Amino acid sequence: MSIPSLWIEKYRPTTLDEYVWQDQTLRSKAEEWLKERALPHLLLSGVSGTGKTSLAKLMLKLLGIPNGDILTIYASRERKIDEVQDRIVNFASTWALNETGFKYVLLDEADSLSQLSQRFLRSEMETYESSCRFILTCNYPQKIITAIHGRVQEVKFVALDKDAFIVRVGEILATEGVEFDIMDVMAYVDMTYPDLRKCIGLTQQYTQKNVLAAPPPPEDMVNGKDYLIEVANLFKNGRYLEARKLIVSQAQVEEYTDIYRYFYKNLHLWGDTEEQQDDALLAIRRGLVNHSVVADPEINIAACLVELSHIAKSK
């Protein structure tokens, strides 16, 4: 039995026409890089969900760069920076396998790196420029040191074209065969714009039996924790282990009580039957009660998620 896809993965753009551009200027620049068959060192900065990582992956795909010539690093999830440095040096110091002659390091959330790590990165960008290019994405470009700014072409993502944003959401819903009220779609757009990833994730989360429900009230959303939308969709699609790993890697201990409440507000994630939702409620209560007394809250929430996974699997 195949595991259902997250829409944000399934509908990641594969052509320039599928990508939602913020303006024609950026599209023209991307077309220029593709024509040259090489990307410069890039810093893609701006608001979450506006297509920074999607654009990087799309251009690498259109250039025909194989996976073996791409090193992807999620800076916010890497705990041992010395290991990251070793990976970069070992990768960048070998020859590319593709005909363009370039390898690429895609460094996501680069603003999470310490200044010391950034100074190392600046040195490697300079050393391997003739054979390896670096693509950095970040939300806060002011956290990137001046020396790196001077070695990259920066693209600032401010806001996507809103009409194209709406059309893309509608196309995905139509392709999935989802029934929807256009006013509900507009409400989701108003709630999430300019974060297209968040909008796609929410519409998938609140689609039940091929019908898009009205969006939840703002107080039911967990502000500042957009990764929970992806977590919810992973659970909804039976990808329990990935969901647990994402929570453990992203959440701070002080956020755990909000996460328990989020799970309580979304009992449908753990099953459609009353029995499943009752069992889920009891598991969530146990996790919350134990949270304040256990020696390791991370292990406690991971154990709660295992219980919830077993409940969801009992469908």
Image (spheres, grey):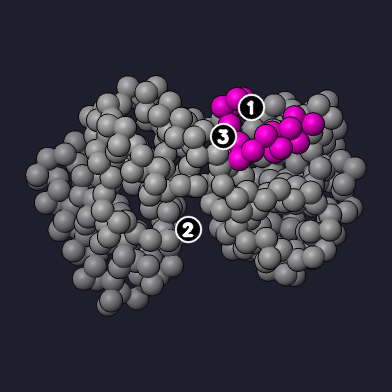
Q: Residues within 10 Å of mark 1 (few under 14, many from 20)?
A: some
Residue 242 in percent (x, y) is at 42, 45
Q: Which one is earlier in the sequence, the residue at label 2 or at label 3?
A: 3
Which structural element holds mark 1?
A: loop
Please tell me which residue is depicted at 35% across the width and 70% down the height of the picture. Answer: 297
Q: Is residue 19 magenta?
A: yes
> The magenta stretch spans which residues?
14-32
User: Which residue in the structure is indicated by mark 1?
Assistant: 16
Q: How crowded is mark 2: few (under 14 residues within 10 Å), some or many (20 or more)?
A: few
The amino acid at mark 3 is Val
Q: Distance between the residues labelled 1 and 3?
A: 8 Å
Q: Which mark is residue 20?
A: 3
User: Which residue in the structure is indicated by mark 2?
Assistant: 249
Please tell me which residue is depicted at 15% across the width and 48% down the height of the picture. Answer: 277
Q: Name the residue at the left extreme.
A: 274
Would you place residue 18 above or below residue 130 in this image? above
Q: Does the magenta stretch include residue 61?
A: no
Q: Is 76 or 184 nearer to us in this picture?
A: 184
Residue 51 in percent (x, y) is at 58, 42
Q: Which one is earlier in the sequence, the residue at label 2 or at label 1?
A: 1
> Taking the image as drawn, is residue 241 in sight?
no
Q: In the picture, residue 175 is in which quadrant?
A: top left
Q: Is 230 or 2 nearer to us in this picture?
A: 230
